[in-house]
Image (cartoon, grey):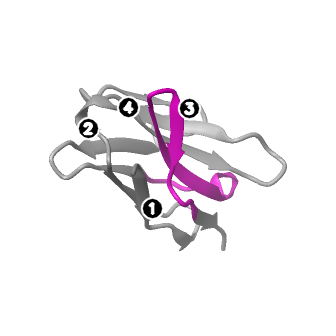
Amino acid sequence: QVHLVQSGGGLVQPGGSLRLSCAASGINFRLHTMNWYRQVPGNQRELVASITGSSSSNYAEAVRGRFTISRDNVRNRTWLQMNSLKPEDTAVYYCSTTMQSLQYWGQGTQVTVSG
């Protein structure tokens, strides 16, 4: 009954911006930390950013200063705003949360930085 549905992503030029969105249902959204991960083939899935229910945020060093995570506890949604994108940001991005020791994932969305 927990569902995370992502939107956004696509192809963007280096230096450009994209915004990813994740809509959550089936959870008491405001009590849960929301996370954005990314994964490149051959690499471990990497935590990019997280935000607590009270909107305290944390970022991986590779994206700090360029990405911003936010949330809306009324609309049950979290966003990842990605600015100054680099080719090395190319990956499949996933939103995630944990409830009762189980981790739930969005369907993933491809972000490609090229050109």
Label pair 4/1, CB-CB below 8 angstroms: no
**66 in the magenta segment:** no
Q: Position of residue 44 (x, y in %)?
A: 75, 40
User: Which residue lies under the disc numbered 1?
Assistant: 17
Mark 4: which amino acid? Answer: Thr
- Name the mark nearer the viewer: 4 or 1: 4
Res 111 → quadrant: bottom right
Q: Report if residue 88 is visible in the image.
A: yes
Identify whether 61 is placed above or below 66: above
**Image location of residue 42, percent across then percent down:** 84, 49
Alpha carbon of mark 2 to alpha carbon of mark 1: how far?
31 Å
Q: Which residue is mark 2?
A: 28
Q: Secondary structure at mark 2?
A: loop
Q: Residue at image x 33%, y 28%?
A: 52
Task: Say which residue label 3 marks.
Answer: 60
Pick the front one: 32 or 40: 32
* Residue contact between numbered discs 3 and 2, judged by CB atoms under 8 Å: no
Q: CA distance from mark 4 to mark 2?
A: 11 Å
Dot placed on the residue nearer the N-terminal end, 2 or 1: 1
If you read the primary sequence from the N terminus, does the residue marked by circle 4 or circle 2 appear first?
2
Residue carrying label 4:
33
User: Along the line of sight, which residue is nearer the eye, 57 or 15?
Assistant: 57
Whole-percent x, y for residue 17 in the image = 45, 61
Q: Nearer the viewer, mark 1 or mark 3?
A: 3
Q: Give, as a single range, the part of the protein colored magenta.
A: 82-109
* Mark 1 Cα-neighbour bin, 10 Å: few <14, some 14–19, many ≥20: some
**Quadrant placement of the C terminus:** bottom right
Q: Amino acid at mark 3?
A: Ala
Q: Nearer the viewer, mark 2 or mark 1?
A: 2
